[in-house]
């Protein structure tokens, strides 16, 4: 499992660099985020959830059964909207409202 | 490399759950200066980075803290400190209320009471628990946070801990930090053994791979007494994603099923180690793969589970969604597979959710098992001025996140008292830091010179993990070992430690990798000594000593150790009751 980075979407804000608990992301000479060591990722998804541009997404490595789908997140207030994109181009959304105490 | 010297009153090593909570607790005393030194950034560092969907240590309605002590003692097969469990359990509910005040959303029932999942567990929307804690810390003017600083050594002067030395992980800065009292909250140790999926997905593990046993290693090298390192923790997890199983097992009553469709959990018991042991045996005896199977679900229940896993282990939700997608594809061709199946539950129209399960590699983690620093009832270690909390502190298993924070509060109170009674006067911090600084400079200077071994830290890390895996009871050895194998492990760890002294670092990140490797090696050495010292098998599933199969009542005691004159001295300590107060004797 690791993080896929779309440099075209990256604004260079550096938020992912700050939150990565492994210190695995850095801003490159072009001012955009780069992944220093994909194999050291813990899949905590902190960077994915904090990326304001949707430039980062999570995937399952093939070694642990990954089938090529990716998952990114957008924060809309208390709602985290996950977008799952399958290899055939289909996608689906799952909304998680963290302010609702009566369920997920 | 420039050196920065800073003085503070309370120095906290590690800004995870315990470290942040210790800082908040200590900041309740006006005028005290508090500093957190954190290897990553406190907003997402430590065990809570991905979030949690339940608080696993909370005293439910109709129960009392003593019930929790009973449960934890039983789960640890008797090897736990009653005094530590009792003081931790007594503060669990207060801790959860504090977290709620900080913004954690706790699920409520129709009467507005906490929604309990069993009597020890409350459901939360905890995706943001770590950012909430970090924000609370950052609001306190008294607390200074040093992010991206890796502490490598505790400074000792005249037998007392007086500070710590660390290095920037991105900037070439050496930090010499002096403090009247120090709280070690660095977490436990992952990465000692080969992981479930070595290679590219090697960090896809249960415990944070960035918790490298720094606190244990610094304590061992400072001469602190350590306890119960032989009680390793092996987690039962969803295969591949290594996501938690409790949400399925406790939340949905999912059963452990083997390949013949038999529910095997009652054959082995439902204690943590027994669940792992049962799954291991079923696989060894040819009845794998084993799955956790929740039947008779409605579609909204499945959607709830997807969201619950997104709040703590998003990889598992992604895995289920991929399987669901494959399932749809194959159904069109007449096939069936996958974790989730529509219309395949027990009742008509219901569905089920399943995940293959497996045991992880062993970890050292004082929040689940009883390993770590040997502390007194107030969480003081045997080194004056040094306190411990969370996964770094031993004797108090099953503390989980809320218990780690409750313990951090106890440690902070004791550290405050110590700091007020023993203010730091003149001390030799700079000279005490000399050896660690000289060693680090050596690694950095050796990058191009002769005398450098042609290896990288990562290669030696793999060599260490493989030696531990094969000879000290890792996954490939089915968590088994004997004395002859432990002797081989000890020899290999000695050789790798020797080689690691000649590594070279290109930059501060390289230096961090070398320090992490070397602290793991220190921990491995003590762990091997502990595995050999307990001549019985008390926790099958976590460890099996094949020279001494079966538990022996003579071993209802703590195996402790201390590094003395370069050798590990093993000693035995009596159990401590829940109504006792334990103090270190000089």
Image: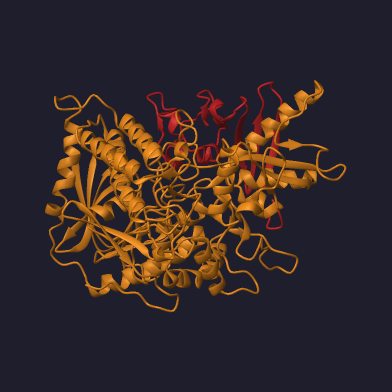
Chain colours: A red, B orange
Q: Quadrant of the C terminus of chain B?
A: bottom left
Quarter of the image for residue A92 reads top right
Whether residue B30 can be seen here: no
Q: In the drawing, does residue B469 fall left or right of residue B256? A: left
Whether residue B163 can be seen here: yes
Q: Residue at x 42, y 57 (%)?
A: B366
> Does residue B278 lie above or below B55 as drawn?
above
x then y, percent, for residue B383: 24, 64
Q: In the drawing, does residue B50 fall left or right of residue B333? A: left
x then y, percent, for residue B234: 49, 48
Q: Nearer the viewer, residue B423 or B349?
A: B349
x then y, percent, for residue B135: 47, 55
Q: How many marks?
A: 0
Quarter of the image for residue B199 reads top left
Q: In the drawing, does residue B278 fall left or right of residue B515? A: right
> Does residue B347 lie above or below B408 as drawn?
above
Residue at the far bottom in the pictured view = B579
Q: Quadrant of the N terminus of chain B?
A: top left
Q: Nearer the viewer, residue B469 or B206?
A: B469
x then y, percent, for residue A17: 43, 37
Q: Residue at x 15, y 47 (%)?
A: B435
Q: Nearer the viewer, residue B556 or B146?
A: B556
Q: Residue at x 65, y 34 (%)?
A: A83
């Amino acid at each position: 499992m690791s993080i896929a980075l779309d440099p075209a979407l990256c604004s260079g804000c550096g938020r992912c660099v700050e939150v990565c608990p492994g210190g695995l992301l850095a801003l490159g000479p072009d001012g955009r985020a780069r992944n220093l060591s994909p194999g050291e990722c813990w899949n905590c998804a902190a960077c994915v959830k904090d990326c304001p541009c949707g430039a980062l997404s999570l995937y399952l490595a093939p070694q642990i059964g990954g089938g090529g789908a990716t998952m990114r997140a957008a924060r809309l207030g208390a709602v985290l909207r996950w977008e799952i994109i399958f290899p055939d181009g289909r996608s689906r959304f799952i909304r998680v409202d963290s302010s609702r105490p009566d369920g997920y | 490399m420039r050196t920065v010297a800073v003085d503070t009153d309370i120095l906290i090593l590690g800004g995870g759950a315990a470290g942040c909570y210790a800082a908040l607790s200590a900041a309740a005393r006006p005028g005290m200066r508090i500093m957190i030194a954190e290897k990553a950034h406190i907003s997402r560092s430590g065990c809570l980075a991905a979030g949690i969907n339940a608080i696993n240590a909370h005293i439910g309605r109709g129960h009392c803290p003593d019930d929790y002590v009973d449960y934890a003692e039983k789960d640890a097969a008797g090897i736990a400190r009653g005094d530590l469990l009792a003081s931790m359990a007594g503060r669990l509910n207060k801790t959860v209320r504090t977290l709620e005040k900080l913004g954690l959303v706790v699920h409520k029932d129709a009467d507005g009471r906490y929604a309990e999942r069993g009597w020890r567990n409350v459901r939360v929307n905890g995706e943001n628990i770590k950012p909430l804690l970090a924000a609370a810390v950052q609001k306190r003017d008294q607390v200074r946070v040093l992010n991206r600083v890796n502490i490598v050594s505790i400074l000792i002067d005249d037998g007392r801990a007086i500070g710590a030395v660390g290095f920037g992980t991105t900037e070439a800065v050496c930090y010499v930090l002096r403090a009247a009292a120090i709280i070690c909250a660095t977490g436990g140790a992952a990465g000692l053994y080969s992981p479930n999926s070595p290679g590219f997905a090697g960090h896809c593990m249960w415990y944070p791979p960035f918790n490298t046993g720094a606190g244990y290693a610094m304590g061992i090298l400072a001469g602190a007494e350590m306890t119960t390192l032989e009680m390793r923790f092996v987690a039962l997890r969803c295969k591949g994603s290594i996501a938690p199983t409790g949400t399925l097992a406790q939340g949905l009553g999912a059963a452990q099923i083997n390949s013949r469709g038999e529910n095997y959990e009652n054959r082995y018991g439902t204690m943590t180690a027994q669940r792992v042991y049962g799954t291991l045996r079923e696989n060894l005896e040819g009845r794998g793969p084993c799955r956790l199977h929740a039947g008779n679900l409605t579609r909204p229940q499945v959607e709830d589970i997807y969201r619950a896993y997104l709040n703590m282990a998003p990889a598992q939700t992604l895995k289920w969604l991929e399987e669901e997608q494959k399932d749809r594809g194959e159904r069109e061709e007449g096939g069936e597979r996958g974790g989730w199946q529509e219309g395949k539950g027990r009742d008509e129209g219901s569905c089920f959710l399943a995940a293959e399960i497996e045991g992880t590699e062993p970890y050292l983690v004082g929040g689940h098992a009883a390993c770590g620093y040997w502390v007194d009832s107030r969480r003081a270690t045997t080194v004056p001025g040094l306190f411990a909390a969370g996964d770094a502190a031993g004797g108090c298993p099953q503390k989980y996140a809320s218990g780690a924070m409750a313990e951090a509060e106890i440690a902070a109170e004791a550290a405050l008292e110590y700091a007020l009674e023993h203010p730091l006067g003149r001390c030799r911090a700079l000279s005490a830091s000399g050896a660690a600084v000289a060693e680090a400079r050596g690694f950095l200077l050796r990058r191009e010179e002769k005398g450098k071994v042609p290896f990288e830290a990562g290669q030696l890390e793999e060599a260490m993990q493989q030696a531990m895996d094969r000879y000290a009871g890792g996954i490939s050895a089915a968590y088994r070992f004997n004395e002859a194998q432990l002797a081989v492990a000890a020899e290999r760890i000695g050789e790798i430690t020797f080689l690691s002294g000649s590594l070279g670092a290109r930059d501060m990140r390289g230096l961090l990798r070398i320090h992490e490797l070397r602290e793991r090696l220190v921990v491995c050495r003590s762990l091997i000594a502990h595995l050999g010292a307990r001549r019985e098998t008390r926790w099958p599933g976590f460890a099996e000593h094949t020279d001494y199969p079966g538990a022996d009542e003579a071993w209802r005691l703590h195996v402790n150790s201390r590094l003395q004159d370069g050798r590990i001295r093993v000693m035995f300590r009596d159990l401590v009751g829940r109504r006792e107060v334990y103090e270190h004797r000089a």
